[in-house]
Amino acid sequence: MLPFGCLYFLSDVWYIVIKGLVKYRNEVIADNLIHAFPEKSAREILLLRNKFYRYFCDVTLESIKLYHLNAKQLHKRIKFTGTEKLDALAEKHNGAILLAFHYNNWEWSSALQQQLNCKLLMVYNKMRDNEPMDEFLQNAREKWGGEPVQMGRAAKVTFRYFAQQEPVVVGLIADQSALASSQMWAMFMNREAAFFPGPVKIARKTNQPVFFQYAKRLGRGKYEYRYTLLADEPAKMDDREILLRYIEKMEEVIKTNPEYYLWSHKRWKHKRPEGTALIQ
């Protein structure tokens, strides 16, 4: 409930604590950055890690702040670009798939529902190690009218809406770490990574257009969410092509301002099993 000025003062204090005292996931962050940017010196990696810590403090408190923001306050701080095309194609094709990722403030993008004429399904992975926080975030996301759906139910719910001819935009944070047993492995930021097959399989089966979300930071607590078309007729494409387009867009964005990606996420914790081909 704090005003933003107090919120960012608190963030500045927290930044000093987690950078210098707690050293939150310091080894994970450093390892991820070293692999992603092998051309950078040790000093450059350190500076980038510190920039990430500052962003991480801001975006964490902003995510909690979402619960107490009203529509008027939020709309002063965010703007949407490309929603007209997203909404129109979703209406035309009985739905659309929206691929986002852990870059900048992905939580505030739940307000996209207010820009759409159709329903927004927000697919998420349940935080089993922190159920109170998981419930808190679900309540914050739902306040804009979207419908949270657990990852395991995403396909079933999507196909139900599709069969009823009720257009929905299915939003997924699709860069989350998939199981090692996944059959979709590709290079992502210079390392082999597993991806969930669900998003592209749903897109191909329904032939719903696939969009990409880019969250651009305009300033502290100010964002622009841009929506661009990745695939207009996915049924005519291979699963691998859709995935590689998504990865290409993510890497393009991350390399522009790498400090805004969630480097503390253990994205590359699995090893590709023998016999599983790497998508190229």
Image (spheres, helix red, strand yellow):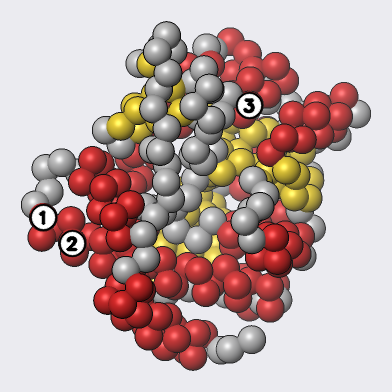
Badge nearest the viewer, 2 or 3: 2
- Which quadrant would residue 123 be assigned to in this image? top right
CB under 8 Å between discs 2 and 1? yes
Element on which disc 2 rests:
helix
Q: Position of residue 212 (x, y in %)?
A: 52, 39
CB under 8 Å between discs 3 and 1? no
**Local crowd size for mark 2, using a 10 Å CA cut-off: few (<14), some (14–19), many (≥20):** some
Residue at left offset 8%, top offset 52%:
41
Foreground of the two, 122 or 34: 34
Q: Is residue 157 left or right of residue 105?
A: right
- Which quadrant would residue 43 be assigned to in this image? bottom left
**Local crowd size for mark 1, using a 10 Å CA cut-off: few (<14), some (14–19), many (≥20):** few
Q: Amino acid at mark 3?
A: Gly
Q: Can you identify the residue that label 3 sits on?
A: 198
Q: Which of marks 3 and 2 precedes in the sequence? A: 2
Q: Say which quadrant the C terminus sits in.
A: top left
Q: Amino acid at mark 1?
A: Ala
Residue at left offset 35%, top offset 28%:
192
Q: Is residue 162 left or right of residue 56?
A: right
Q: Can you identify the residue that label 2 sits on?
A: 46
